[in-house]
Amino acid sequence: MSTAGTMNQSIQFDIDLINRYDKAGPRYTSYPTALELHSGFTDQDYRQHIAKSNAAGGPLSLYFHIPFCDTVCFYCACNKIVTKNRNHAVPYLENLLKEVAMQGALFDKSRVVNQLHWGGGTPTFLSYPQMQQLMAATREHFHLRDDDEGEYSIEVDPRETNDHTIKQLRELGFNRISLGLQDFDPAVQKAVNRLQSEEQTFAVLAAARAEGFRSTNIDLIYGLPLQTVDTFAKTLETVLAVSPDRFSIFNYAHMPARFKTQRQINDDDLPTADVKLAILQMVGLRLIEAGYVYIGMDHFAKPDDELAVAQREGKLYRNFQGYSTHSDCDLVGLGITSIGRVGDAYIQNVKELDEYDQLIKQGKLPVFKGVDLNEDDKLRREVITQLICHFSLNFSPIEQQFGIDFSHYFADELRALAIMQADGLLSLTSKDISVLPAGRLLIRNVCMVFDKYLAQKKQQQFSKVI
């Protein structure tokens, strides 16, 4: 276990504070948030940013969006296409392979891919020959590592994965795996249309360990219909018995006006805000008792997991896939809806299959929206990233990097933080900000103070903090 750093990776529950601060806000997988992306940003703009990025050099991160799912989970807010027909993946894969070739031709081939992630949907919707084809094309057009030192991860649905699939994924080069679970309680599973047994789930986890996957993550969701503190505690104990390296424990955001599938959830079955809070408190206390540390924003990890080590060493980073250890990578998004960060821009691909098909056939990059970051955006992004990853911010490096006087530039923000200091969320000096254990669950609130765009937004576009 790394002994680097002496950071206190703990949290403290203050119900009164949480109730007072529990309002809607962004998750800050980027700043500016994806809401600032606009359609005035074109394929041409993206190409210019790639050229600048190549001049700067450095490693790459690739994200592939595989949008297909075999069945629909009612809570899902992802961009997905639900179909039993595996043939639907064929034209999409053909286009994705063309996009890989197009984007690969624009990036300097000497730039090593240190991070790669397949998300969805359900990436294992693809057959093994299709997955092989996609990885081979990626290897042909980008500089993938072959020493197993990269962070190559995949999301899997244990209901359609077996030890044979896991062996194949390992052969393709994946070395990290995330298993969707959400809840083992039969009534909850039925209410969200996701029936999944302990046997299925743990067989996949055991196979991943046997094949040498370096990190295993289990996804759970609290706030689903019919959940209680007792039922969720039972699920948690069952999972703790197999000791995954990481947990992602998400707050279910019920937004049926935005996500059609959520309309199939009965509102009366949803736990109250008090019950949700009690579940979260139970989870936090139980995981810390079991030896996990709180990374932030729904994530817990074992102290020797690379996320926990990176946080202690001040090297943790946050991007569209969540927390990461590769802050030095430009992120290239591939497939529909995927978002990338290249140089000082964010870029999102088109969201619809037919539009994607048309643009790829015309030999155009499937850019839908994007945003160029100005100096103020870059400064605020650095501040927010430091806070959300490390729960602390030293003003001096920021002042040097951006040529500002922190207390002058952020005078209004510091006044707002003084109120949070009085409430016990953080401590504020003339040199730095430290988020205290009671403020860590509310880190989004602290970051929101530095978000210049938030005042202009309607709060209901975001999920609640807790």
Image (cartoon, grey):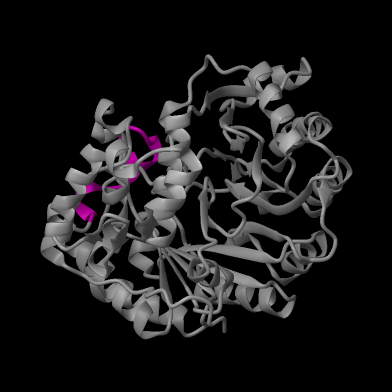
- The residue furthest right is 140
All told, the count of numbered labels is: 0
Instruction: Residue at 18%, 44% (x, y): give it.
Output: 416
Q: Which x, y percent locates residue 120?
A: 58, 46
Where 402 falls versus 17 (above or below)? above
Would you say 362 lies left or right of 218 here? right
The answer to which of 362 and 322 lies nearer the viewer is 322
Would you say 436 lies left or right of 415 here? right
Residue 433 sits inside the magenta stretch:
no
Instruction: Residue at 33%, 80% (x, y): give it.
Output: 286
Instruction: Residue at 22%, 55% (x, y): give it.
Output: 269
Q: Which x, y percent locates residue 376?
A: 42, 31
Magenta stretch in the rendered image: 257-270
The answer to which of 264 and 257 lies nearer the viewer is 257
Image quarter where the C terminus lies is: bottom left
Residue 263 sits inside the magenta stretch:
yes
The answer to which of 187 and 7 lies nearer the viewer is 7
Where on the picture, by quarter, is residue 221?
A: bottom left
Instruction: Residue at 59%, 52% (x, y): give it.
Output: 327
The answer to which of 255 and 150 lies nearer the viewer is 150
Where 216 falls versus 74 (above or below)? below
Q: Which x, y percent locates residue 180?
A: 52, 61
Would you say 451 lies left or right of 381 here? left
Image quarter where the N terminus lies is: bottom right
Can see residue 37?
yes
Would you say 240 lies left or right of 332 here? left
Q: Which x, y percent locates residue 404?
A: 40, 38
Where 128 falls versus 15 (above or below)? above
